[in-house]
Amino acid sequence: MYGVDIAELAVTISEGALYPNLGLTASAQKQWDPLFNINKETNISVLGTLTVPIYQGGSEYATIRQSKETLGQQRLNLDVNRDQARATVVQSWGQLDAAKAQIEATTAQVNAAEIALKVCAKKPASASVPRSTFSMRSRNSSMRALVTAQHDRVVASYTLLAAVGGLSMQRLGLNVMVYDPQVHYQQVRDAWVGVRTPDGR
């Protein structure tokens, strides 16, 4: 959006080359008589100059057309970026929903494996050894799938936060110093000379 604003200003600046130009010059002059210390003559002149461009070879018109084309390109870029941002949000939201559903499914698998392992534990040792080994493997596999689904949900949550612009230090509550450009501007706005920054570099 800032790129579009800059391109609009560039069009206005380019069109300014076709506008009339008014210049004003003023001067004052005094002559003193050194003998009597009196003012002999005072001259004041004001000169106004109006320049109206009639034909300048066409370069200004070409620059204006170029600026307008650049403005159109920036507007297209803005539309593309908006569409990409929306698509990223929709995709991230879908991934988050899928991760939540995966957590529910793997939790049900873990619960089923736990029940099967308890059932196998109640049977006689000779009959339940192969089944209990299979049930333990199934439970371990389900638990790994659950941990993976929980990991995917956390990643999808942060991806969604980043897509909607919420992945900032302020929103996350990180204990770090946040750069504020307004504070920096207030610190350096009166520094007409010198190259040192407020932190001494």
Image (cartoon, helix red, strand yellow):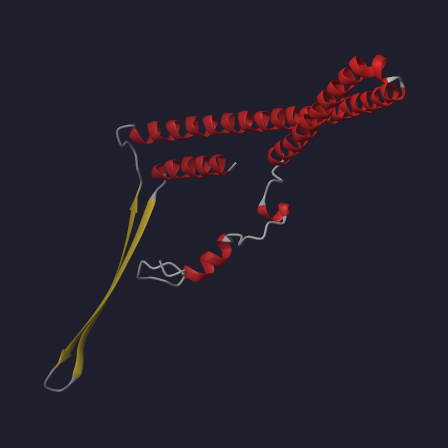
Q: Nearer the viewer, residue 80 or 168?
A: 168
| Left or right side of 11 for 157 | right
Most extreme residue toward the bottom is 36
Q: Nearer the viewer, residue 175 or 59?
A: 175
The quarter of the picture where the C terminus appears is: bottom left
Is 133 drawn above or below residue 23 in the view shown?
above
How many numbered marks does the figure carry? 0
Is 50 drawn above or below residue 30 in the view shown?
above
| Left or right side of 182 for 143 | right
Most extreme residue toward the front is 126
Q: Residue 34: where, in percent of width, then height? A: 11, 83
Please give the name of the residue rendered at 12% of the width and 81% of the height, measured from the top-left corner. Answer: 33
Q: Residue 60: where, in percent of width, then height? A: 32, 32
Q: Quadrant of residue 139?
A: top right
Is 34 drawn above or below residue 58 in the view shown?
below
Q: Nearer the viewer, residue 72 or 158?
A: 158
Q: Quadrant of residue 128?
A: top right
| Left or right side of 74 for 41 | left
Q: Residue 55: where, in percent of width, then height? A: 28, 31
Q: Residue 114: where, in percent of width, then height? A: 82, 24
Is 187 drawn above or below residue 30 in the view shown?
above
Please give the name of the residue rendered at 64% of the width and 28% of the height, measured from the top-left corner. Answer: 89
